[in-house]
Image: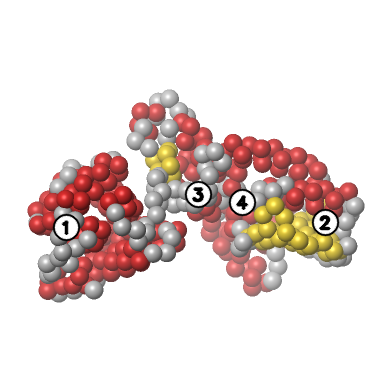
Amino acid sequence: MNLQGDFEGLFLTSILQLLCNDQKTGLLRVTSGDNECKVFFEEGTIVYASGSQKEARLGYILRRDGIISAEQLQKCLELGREQKVSLGKILVDKGYVTMSTLKKYNTKQVEEILYSLLLWKKGKFEYKDIKLNLEGMVITQLNPMKLILEASRRIDEMSVLNTVITSDNLVFRISGHVQNKEDEIRLNANEWRILSLIDGNRTIRQIVAQSGYDEFAVYKIIFSLNSYGLVEQKEEVQLSDSAGKEEYSAVITVYNDILQSVIRNIEHELGDRASSLFDEVKADLGGEYGKIFENYHPSHHASSNIKSIAEQVASIEKGEESGKESLINGFNDYTTLVLQKIAGILGMNPMQAILKDIENIIGYVKKYHAESLEKNRIVNDITNIVTNIASPKSSGDKQRTKGKGIFSFFS
């Protein structure tokens, strides 16, 4: 029997039920976007499954749970490629895991793959009756009906989680209430692991990939952390080419994220000086740019910074530049002066971590913001600023051109 087509919602559970009830032996291949999953059936029982997502791999799960180290995993993966044998066999031969542990985690891997698979909202499927060659494989025997019941429970719970986490592109950050909650809330190891990855830049999708936990587990933990008041959703704004004062918030938010990452990186080294440094460079801006940042500071709440800067930009909008152009040029000047001052105080070695964080933020903007001239302008501007800070040129490169800002010289 051959089956193929598109699926949406819970339709995959019906396919699994059908293959189980008809006691099929063959391969079910399911795709959704870049993700792929293969499920192997033998007489209606699931005996193996593989997934393209990193968190679904056996070695990743073993490392995540502390059964093997990252070093042991890497060594066994290399040996497996050289000898063309499975990772499981290498792990057992090396004595890193016992056969019983391997079987246990092989079953766990298959379960996690299938639970994630049944959460996929839509995609394509194809089933073919084929004779399986299971020689040398550590197989499992899972009852599809038991998996479907658990998956259905997760789907129901996921509908509740999705009221807070509406997309895997959302970004969460640590809230300002963490210190007030420390004595009231006790987090387990899994919650601490996810909390450590929430930095105001990583998307939910990136946290899933880096944590090693499946999507359902990450959603549950972030939902709980949000309920505790430990994390909050970062306001998502999109850069665009629209004109008007109401569109300043997206530009301000991007640069504010960058400057907040800078102050976080230097607080340990500079102490109180870290905060005052951002005010010191304002004197070097002067003119209309100095006025724009008169009440700005990266330690202030984002909404306060957006309000104060937007008001100042509006007051100079009738000059040579448009309001948004003045805003971007001003931020380029301000960011460059801040980074130059920090480099002068700390030297270039500590600057590497600062510049890396800025690159990560710009990478997020480049990947997730809709295409626009404004987005491309900011990505290119900040990329060039980072490049010039990392590889300082002659002092002549720091000259400023009236109405264009420091960055105009780099262009």
Instruction: Tell me the residue at 57%/64% (across/down).
Output: 75
Q: Tell which circle, 3 or 4, labels the residue nearer the N-terminal end.
A: 4
Q: Nearer the viewer, residue 25 or 88?
A: 25
Q: How far apart are marks 2 and 3 (CA)?
A: 32 Å
Report the mark closest to the observer, 2 or 4.
2
Query: In the rendered structure, which amino acid carries the disc numbered 3?
Result: Ile
Residue 240 seen: yes
Residue 252 seen: no
Label 4 neighbour load within 10 Å: few <14, some 14-19, many 20+: many
Answer yes or no: do the residues labelled 2 and 3 have beta carbons within 8 Å?
no
Q: How far apart are marks 3 and 1 (CA)?
A: 41 Å
Query: In the rendered structure, which amino acid carries the disc numbered 2?
Result: Phe
Q: Distance between the residues labelled 2 and 1?
A: 70 Å
Answer yes or no: do the residues labelled 2 and 1 have beta carbons within 8 Å?
no
Q: Nearer the viewer, residue 136 or 91?
A: 136
State the residue position of label 1: 318
Answer yes or no: do the residues labelled 3 and 1 have beta carbons within 8 Å?
no
Q: How far apart are marks 3 and 4 (CA)?
A: 19 Å
Residue 82 image position (x, y, % from top left):
64, 73
Query: In the rendered structure, which amino acid carries the disc numbered 1?
Result: Lys
State the residue position of label 4: 61
Helix, strand or loop for disc 4: helix
State the residue position of label 2: 41
Q: Tell which circle, 1 or 4, labels the residue nearer the N-terminal end.
A: 4
State the residue position of label 3: 204
Helix, strand or loop for disc 3: helix
